[in-house]
Amino acid sequence: MEIIIQPTPEAATAIAARLVARLIRKKPAAVLGLATGGTMEPLYRELVAQKLDWSRLTTFNLDEYVGIAPEHSQSYHRFMREKLLQHVNVAAANVNIPDGLAQDVPAACENYERKISAAGGIDLQLLGIGTHGHIGFNEPTSSLASRTRIKTLTPQTRRDNARYFGGEEQVPHHVITLGIGTILESRHCLLLAFGKQKARAIAAAVEGPITAMCPASVLQLHPRVTVFLDEAAAAELKLTDYYRWVYAQKPDWQRI
Ligand code: GLP
């Protein structure tokens, strides 16, 4: 795992955006795994500003709330459209987001997995992290081998996301999320976390034991993970001096 600590979220986001842009330029038909949440918004703004060619890219989103329509102000369909997709030249047919209104949820989830495989797998997966360590909507105690499926949100996540819905009671209980096993099959994971409210989850994910109680800790098993943090999110890590030294000493050919 590579840990990149920057003074501010803006500085960390700029480096993450360079990494995504580099892939898009190098592999114009790449498959991107996209995430939602406040952490991703500045990253998408940077990517839009770079005016990259998205015409041959395929995208798969991590998750969606069950029971809310794509037009709902808090649906992840809407988030993606407004924050990224309507500003780039991606082909609508290549955009995939779980269907929160699917009549047959298990069949829709299986189909989503099949589409990812048919597209050749995810080249680069963007991830945020929940305050208790979820990735996508894989809540604590999720199977570390899970595939795309329905999950029930924990009270903690519903409280965390209440700010977007204007109240906890408005937050749906159920979601569809890419499984942890599915995430692990992506070729490169970029995890972004900013702010002190993420510090504990980051310490558990990066330096704690691999445990379903912190689903992001399973990324320790992935061969290629880059973690982008600001100082506040890095505050509870033990080996920060080491991570900084490694990043400062990167040979030119590894620089982002
Ligand atoms: C949300 C999403 C996650 C996201 C996380 C952090 O609920 N399902 O994919 O990474 O929680 O969100 P934020 O970036 O708003 O803190």
Image (tube, rainbow, N blue to C red):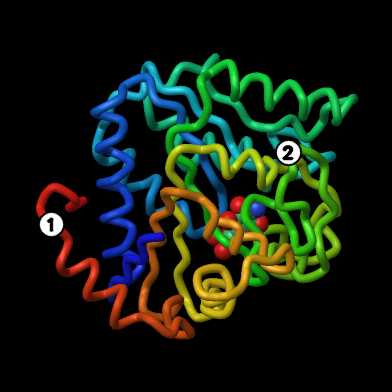
Q: In the figure, is residue 199 to the left or right of 169?
A: left
Ligand 1 - quadrant of the structure image: bottom right
The image quarter in which residue 165 lies: bottom right
Which comes before the other along the chain, label 1 or label 2? 2
Image location of residue 90, percent across then percent down: 42, 22
The image quarter in which residue 78 lies: top right
Q: What residue is drawn where x is 17% and y is 53%?
A: 255
Amino acid marked by disc 2: Arg
- Which residue occupies the extreme left position in the image? 252
107 up-or-down from 4: above or below: above
Q: What residue is drawn where x is 58% and y is 16%?
A: 118
Whole-Å distance between the Cαs marked 1 and 2?
Answer: 37 Å
Amino acid marked by disc 1: Pro
Mark seen at residue 251: 1
Closer-to-camera residue (174/33)? 33
The residue labelled by disc 2 is 147
Q: What residue is drawn where x is 39% and y is 32%?
A: 87
Circle 1 crowding by C-alpha within 10 Å: few under 14, some 14–19, many from 20: few
51 up-or-down from 213: above or below: above
Image location of residue 156, percent across then percent down: 76, 71
Which of discs 1 and 2 lies nearer the camera? The answer is: 1
Closer-to-camera residue (130/42)? 130
Find out whether the residues at labels 1 and 2 contact each other: C-beta distance under 8 Å: no
Total numbered labels placed on residues in the image: 2
Image location of residue 34, percent across then percent down: 51, 40
Label 2 element class: loop
The image quarter in which residue 153 lies: bottom right
Image location of residue 47, percent across then percent down: 32, 41
Q: Which quadrant would the N terminus be assigned to in this image?
A: bottom left
